[in-house]
C-alpha cells in the first residue's frame, strides 16, 4: 500500500536534556498510512552538547540529518532551512523541547489524504503540576488553547503542513501562526487533531512565565500588522467565556484563576509596550530555562 510520506523538522537550541528522548519517540512512531521519509534537526548555535547527541543518531540512522547554524537566526529562520532541505510534500515541525505520543505523527499526517487540508496541529499537553500556581496557570492556558482550537483551529508546538510555500517571514516570533496565515490565504483548511498528543513543559516560575507570554503577545501583534492575520486567542470575549467554563470545573481554584488573569493581562501589556513603544520584535527570543527539563520518557 502506498503511504503518505512526510519530512519532520526538529528545531533545537540547547536541547541536550530532551533531544535523545524526542528522536527515540520519532523513530518508534506507530505508523500505518504514513511514512517518515526523513528527520532533519536544525540546531541553532547549541553549546550544551545537543549536536553531539544528534550526530550519534545520525551515524546510526540514514534518514536523520543534522543542520547546524553558527549563529542563532531565530526559529522561523531555522524552519526555512528545514523547508529548503526537506524532500516531502507534507512537512512536520516540532519544537526540540517536546515529545510526541507514539501515534501523533500518524494522526497529524494522515488527514492530508484529503486535498482540502493544508495544515494540522496536535494537542500540547503540559506535564506541569497544577497544584502550584504557575503549574495551574500553564495548564489553564493550554486547556484554553484546546478549547479555542475546538472552536477555530489554533495550532502550535507541533504542526504539519503542505509544501505550498518556500519560506515563512524569518522575523516572525510566532512561526506556527505565520504558517496558518499562509495556508488560510491559499484557501486550504486548518485542522486541529485533539487526540494527537504532544507533551511539553511550561515555565516553572513566574519570571519565565511572563517572559514567554510577553514574547508571544509581541509576536501576535507583529503578525496582525505585517501578515494581516489574527489568531483566535486574541478574541478577548471568547477567552473570558472559556475561562469561566474552566472555573466552573474547579471553583476552588478561583484565586489561582484571578491571579492567572492578572498575570496574563500584565504580560500582554508588556508585549504591547515592547511592540508599539519600543518597536521590538523578539524573533530571536531569550529562552525560558525552566521549560527545558521535560521528564517524560
Image (spheres, rainbow, N blue to C red):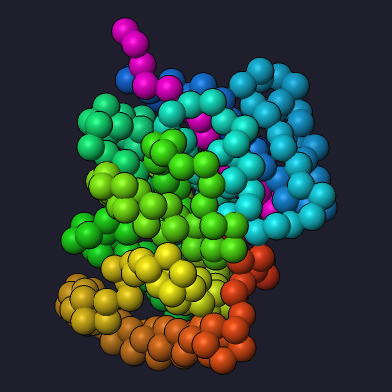
Query: Is 26 above or below relative to 233?
Result: above
Residue 10 included in the magenta stretch of the image:
yes
Image coordinates of residue 265 in percent, x first then y, are 41, 88
**Number of callouts:** 0
Query: Is 135 above or below relative to 199?
Result: below
From the viewer's perspective, is 52 left or right of 42? Answer: right
Q: What residue is drawn where x is 27% and y is 39%?
A: 117
Q: What residue is drawn where x is 47% and y is 90%?
A: 269
Image coordinates of residue 41 in percent, x first then y, are 65, 38
Q: What residue is drawn where x is 27% and y is 27%?
A: 113
Residue 129 in view in this figure:
no
From the viewer's perspective, is 293 left or right of 196? Answer: right
Residue 279 falls in which quadrant of the image? bottom right
Image coordinates of residue 226 in percent, x first then y, are 46, 69
Residue 231 falls in which quadrant of the image? bottom left
Range covered by the magenta-colored residues? 1-18
Foreground pick, 295 / 290: 290
Image coordinates of residue 16 in percent, x first then y, are 72, 47
Q: Residue furthest top?
A: 1
Q: What residue is drawn where x is 46% and y is 42%?
A: 165
Query: Is 148 above or below relative to 261?
Result: above
The N terminus lies in quadrant: top left
Residue 85 included in the magenta stretch of the image:
no
Query: Is 17 above or below relative to 152?
Result: above
Residue 117 in view in this figure:
yes
The C terminus lies in quadrant: top right
Residue 21 falls in which quadrant of the image? top right
Foreground pick, 7 / 172: 172
Amino acid at each position: 500500500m502506498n503511504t503518505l510520506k512526510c519530512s519532520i523538522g526538529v528545531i533545537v537550541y540547547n536541547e541536550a536534556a530532551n533531544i535523545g528522548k524526542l528522536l527515540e519517540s520519532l523513530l518508534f512512531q506507530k505508523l500505518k498510512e504514513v511514512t517518515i521519509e526523513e528527520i532533519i534537526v536544525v540546531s541553532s548555535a547549541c553549546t550544551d552538547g545537543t549536536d553531539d547527541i544528534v550526530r550519534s543518531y545520525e551515524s546510526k540512522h540514514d534518514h536523520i540529518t543534522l543542520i547546524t547554524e553558527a549563529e542563532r537566526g531565530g526559529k522561523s529562520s531555522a524552519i526555512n532551512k528545514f523547508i529548503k532541505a526537506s524532500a516531502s510534500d507534507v512537512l512536520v515541525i516540532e519544537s526540540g523541547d517536546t515529545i510526541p505520543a507514539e501515534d501523533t505523527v500518524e494522526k497529524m499526517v494522515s488527514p492530508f489524504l484529503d486535498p482540502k487540508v493544508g495544515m494540522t496541529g496536535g494537542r500540547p499537553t503540559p506535564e506541569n503540576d497544577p497544584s502550584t500556581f504557575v503549574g495551574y496557570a500553564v495548564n489553564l492556558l493550554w486547556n484554553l488553547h484546546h478549547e479555542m482550537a475546538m472552536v477555530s483551529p489554533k495550532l502550535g508546538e507541533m504542526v504539519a503542513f503542505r509544501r505550498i510555500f518556500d519560506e515563512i517571514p524569518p522575523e516572525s516570533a510566532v512561526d506556527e501562526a505565520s504558517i496558518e496565515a499562509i495556508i488560510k490565504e491559499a484557501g486550504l483548511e486548518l485542522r486541529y487533531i485533539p487526540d494527537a498528543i504532544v507533551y511539553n513543559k511550561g515555565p516553572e516560575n513566574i519570571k519565565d512565565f511572563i517572559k514567554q507570554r510577553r514574547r508571544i503577545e509581541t509576536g501576535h501583534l507583529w503578525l496582525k500588522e505585517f501578515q494581516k492575520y489574527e489568531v483566535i486567542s486574541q478574541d478577548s470575549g471568547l477567552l473570558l467565556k472559556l475561562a469561566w467554563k474552566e472555573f466552573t470545573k474547579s471553583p476552588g481554584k478561583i484565586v489561582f484563576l484571578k491571579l492567572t488573569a492578572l498575570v496574563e493581562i500584565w504580560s500582554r501589556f508588556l508585549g504591547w509596550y515592547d511592540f508599539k513603544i519600543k518597536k521590538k520584535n523578539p524573533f530571536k527570543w531569550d529562552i525560558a530555562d525552566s521549560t527545558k527539563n521535560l521528564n517524560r520518557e
